[in-house]
Image: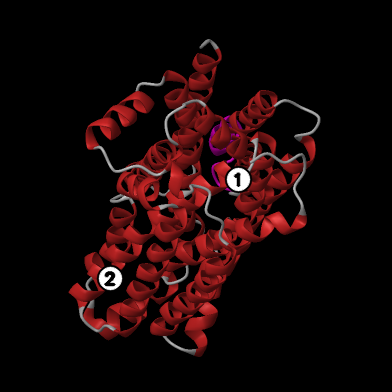
Amino acid sequence: MTKTHIHPKSLTFPILLVLYEIATYLSNDMYLPALPQMMKEIGLSTKQAQATLTTWFIGSAFLPLVMGVISDRYGRRPVLLLGGVIYILATIACAITSDTNTLLIARFIEGAAIPSMMVAGYACIHELYDQKEAIRILALMGSITVLAPALGPLLGSIVLYFTSWRGIFWFISIWALIIIVLLVRWMPETFPPEKRQPIHYGTLFIQYARVLTNKKFMLLMMVLGFIFTGFIVWITAGPLLVIENFHYPPIVFGMFQAFVFAAYIAGNHLVKHILEFIKVSTLIRLGLFITLAGGILAFVSSVCFAKTIYPFLMSMTIYSFGSALCFSPLNRSIIEASDEPMSVRVSLFTVLWTGFAVLGSAIASLFFSGSILSISIPVAVVVIISAIMKIAAAYLP
């Protein structure tokens, strides 16, 4: 389906999808301030409290490949909507349980339901819009979804002040329910019955293998993935650096984080306007150059100004702005690099994207020692790797 411009009405589904995506992300970001209260009320140990996060991530990495196959067989709408119902029920289970094992199972199911949104929902976006329109839509959605990690902890603290940790899960479940009801009305079906075929596992494995051996797909995925890894290193270790090591109160960290994410929102907003004047490949190079500059400046500032966080913070803001310029065009370019079925491409993209998030979190856990340098070195390294992957991709036919 090709359009020459985006009519305002065509934004209804993407906006609803991104609001649902925020609800899923809030199930991690929003309840973090409530962990101490949960530990006290349910009797969670520190490891069990951490496991409520880990099981969510494991669940989210568990089903993307399956969701792609199912959405090709039964359509995009049923997969997303049924996944939404499962997500809501799992979130309600989190709200009402007082049993540790039940909570962990519910958190796993919460995470496992999210690929239904990522795979079926984003397959719809790529199937609905042509290249430039899709990039603009993805940039708009990125500007909105970034509000979840930026404002989720603050929103959770507000709900926690008036209710309890259970109120946070009720809030998320009601939010998700409203959006799913609206999606029943407004979500299009971009994969009609005449295109659907029975599942052939042999063919499916061949299709996955073709994508995984597609050099352009994988190199561009690594460009995007390693930039994202650097972002996750900051998101994971940043709170400890600011609060524990520089002794700023949590609200100040929230302001720092909002500043960094504001640059990301600004970058996404700029993408929508300059895409008419420059090529997608040029936009990717520009964004990567700015991101690389931010990563290198982060390292230099951590060496020269180790006792103050502000130069490093400005460097991460530059990194954030540059990554916003190239994230959406890279996303679309990766999808366009293969001719395999859309669900196969989006499924593998989701799996690899999740893998880079896990990599960033693991790097932060292993290397963060309380200094700015222990964050800036991994950030600089991964963005340099990303630049090398982009150079390699440029030499492909």
Q: Main secondary structure of the magenta part?
A: helix
Q: Nearer the viewer, residue 102 or 332?
A: 332
| Extreme residue in the bottom direction | 162
Tell me whether the residue at label 2 lies in contact with that at label 1, contact meaning CB atoms closer than 8 angstroms. Answer: no
Q: Is there any visible trace of residue 247 in the rendered image?
A: no
Q: Amino acid at mark 2?
A: Ala
Residue at label 1?
128
Q: Is residue 388 magenta?
A: no
Left or right of 317? Residue 124 is left
Left or right of 343? Residue 183 is right
Whole-angstrom CA distance, mark 2 to mark 1, is: 33 Å
Q: Is residue 298 magenta?
A: yes
Picture coordinates of residue 53 (x, y %)? Answer: 33, 62
Picture coordinates of residue 170 (x, y %)? Answer: 43, 81
| Extreme residue in the left direction | 101
Label at residue 293: none
Picture coordinates of residue 134 (x, y %)? Answer: 64, 41
- For the N terminus, the image quarter is top right
Q: Is 361 situated above or below 186? A: above
Q: Nearer the viewer, residue 196 or 147?
A: 196
Magenta segment boundaries in residue numbering = 295-308
Left or right of 34? Residue 93 is left
Question: Are there few (<14), some (14-19), or many (20+) residues within 10 Å of tag 1?
Answer: some
Label at residue 106: 2
Q: Amino acid at mark 1?
A: Leu
